[in-house]
Every structure is written in C-alpha cells, then in structure tokens.
Amino acid sequence: MDGEDVLAVYNTAREAVERARAERPDLIECKTYRFRAHSEGMREAGYRSSEEIDAWKKRDPVLSWKNACWPRNGWTRPNWRRLKTRSPPWSMRRGLCEGGPDA
C-alpha cells in the first residue's frame, strides 16, 4: 500500500488490528520514499535526481497529514510546533485526525 498516505495506513492498520483480535493477524506492506541518504554521515550517492526527490517531498506524509487534519480539528501553529518538538519524526502520536491537538 502507499505508505505516504498516513490516513490510509492508519485506517488499514486499525482494520488489521481488529481482524487480528477477532480472527487472524495480517501483514501490511507500506511502500515509502526515503528523502535522505541511508545514514546521517553519508551524502547522496547520486542515483536519484533532485527533481525526483523534490517530487516525492511534495507528497511528504507528515505535511499531508497536517494539511488533512488541521481544518477538521482546530490545530494551530503552536500545536504543530509542540508536536514536532515533543514527538520523534517517525511517530506523530496516536489519534491522527480523531482527537485533535491533544490526542
């Protein structure tokens, strides 16, 4: 599945958890794109063009999630800054769009 689509991943994972509790476990494969080199000390190896990277950055899952959720749940810039500083980049906290900034 498209791992860049945060809400789709969330919904699929939620369904998989429910199914695992009732019937059987599932495996979810999420295809994502890595913007940076493999490690912090590495430079880009040159196998990807800057145009390719820029195109994928436009689909940044964190920004897509932010843009989808802000209008529905009253998110503000201070909430976003607080979330970014308190949460590791790979974890945008629980609740996604369901609970708003304090979820």
Image (cartoon, rainbow, N blue to C red):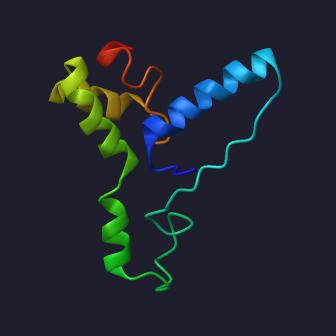
Locate residue 13, reporting x and y percent: 61, 31
Which quarter of the picture shows residue 7? top left
Closer to the camera in the image, 36 or 18: 18
Horizontal placement of 67 versus 93: left or right?
Answer: left
Which residue occupies the foreground of this view, 25 or 33? 25
Q: Residue furthest bottom?
A: 46
Q: Nearer the viewer, residue 68 or 48?
A: 68
Residue at 28%, 26% in the rendered image: 82
Instruction: Name the quarter where the C terminus is drawn.
Output: top left
For the point 43% across and 32% down, the residue is 92
Q: Is residue 40 above or below residue 97?
A: below
Q: Position of residue 12 (x, y in %)?
A: 58, 34
Q: Quadrant of residue 83?
A: top left
- Residue at the location (31% across, 78% down)? 51
Direction right: furthest residue: 24
Q: Is 10 positioned to the left or the right of 54 in the image?
A: right
Q: Residue drawn 48% across and 22% down?
A: 94
**Figure check: 17 above or below 88:** above
Position of 63 compared to 31: left or right? left
* Residue 47, image x, y percentages: 50, 85
In this rendering, would 61 be left or right of 69? Answer: right
